[in-house]
Amino acid sequence: MVGVFYAVIPAGGSGTRLWPLSRAGHPKFLHTLTGTSASLLQATVDRLGQLAEPESTYVVTGVAHAAAVARQLPALPDANILVEPSPRDSCAAIGLAAAIIAARDPHAVMGSFAADHLVRDGDAFASAVRAATDGARDGLLMTVGITPTHPETGYGYLRCGEAVGAGQVRRVAEFTEKPPYEVAVSYVESGEYFWNASMFIWRVDVFLAELLRQQPQLHAGLMRIAHAWNGVDRERVLGEVWPTLPKISVDYAVMEGAAAAGLVGTVPGDFGWNDVGDFHTLGDVLERDERGNVVIESDDGAVGKSDILLHDTDRTVVVPRSGRLVSAVGVHDLIIVDTPDALLVCPRDRAQDVKKLVDSLKERGNPHV
């Protein structure tokens, strides 16, 4: 690969479908949910190590999480943890990193990768990103499209157009967000669609030019912040400008319009990707016992190791975090999450509805969120 590759990891959100394990103050990317001792964030940085050195790896995170991120990533320079004062969605976070990198290396290629995704094959992942980098150097805003394995309604889809050059790059004709089941079936059967996994690779100058075209207010604010970033006025400018930035995802702010203009490309990715959105998904992707049960232990030493006793129990996901004995008899297809201050029990097929519990707790002003 020619030149330095910059890896950017937006680390935000609270993972409400993984409540009560994931909380606003300790979100899912800080938890060990990979089947190893690494947190999701640490695993993300580890696999990006094939592509980017620590000095060219950036994490964009909130004030509440900056210290925990620094503790989990001691090899990362302190200056590479970019702290946003408040959540302004993904375009502001990714755009801030792009503007800061552009000031350092105006034609750099950067990739943006979520902090809370699971990837099984790191070598295949790195290979796909390298292929996407070729398209980025040619001026396309690149994505890594995940080859669909089933008609999933919770993901966005990329419709592929014609091939670009002799490699793997294909132009993206359209972004479609979370289609109905019947539409998702037709997408998968057509072979012309990938899942949008929010993995983006581009030259920073190309991205910032497209941001200027589509979101001039957001571009102006980010450039003002980046100009002040290494000076004495950083906190003042950040405090003044950041709250005025439009709150919008990079998909809606830039990528949909860029795709319509023929500026977006994609390469296929088949490396065991999952966005670990809920406990049911974790039960599918992590190692199971002979009856299909999954126990997700903690390796962070925060609490004592829990005892688990399952009798005549099948396909149940247990997340013990209280240090207590957790036992189950004669049940199947359940989720049991036991933390020191909250207990969740629900059927696996209702895992997506955990978010509704969190919404209700917020409405009641309950502190356990």
Image (cartoon, rainbow, N blue to C red):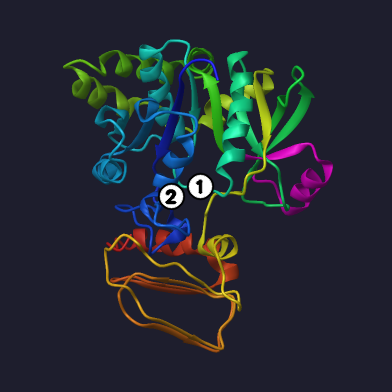
Q: Is residue 290 above or below residue 218?
A: below
Residue furthest to the right in view is 190
Q: Is residue 365 above or below residue 169?
A: below
The quarter of the image holding the N terminus is top right
Residue type indicated by callout 1: His
- Quarter occupied by residue 367: bottom left
Q: Nearer the viewer, residue 267 or 264?
A: 267
- In percent of width and height, residue 156 lies at 63, 42
Q: Residue at x 56, y 84 (%)?
A: 313
User: Can residue 289 be spotted in the picture?
Assistant: yes
Q: Residue at x 39, y 57 (%)?
A: 37
Q: Would you say 303 lies left or right of 294 here?
A: left
Residue identified by numbered label 2: 40
Q: Is residue 68 above or below residue 170?
A: below
Which tag, 1 or 2, sits closer to the chain's start? 2
Span colored in magenta: 178-196
Q: Residue at x 52, y 18 (%)?
A: 207
- In percent of width and height, residue 286 lies at 54, 62
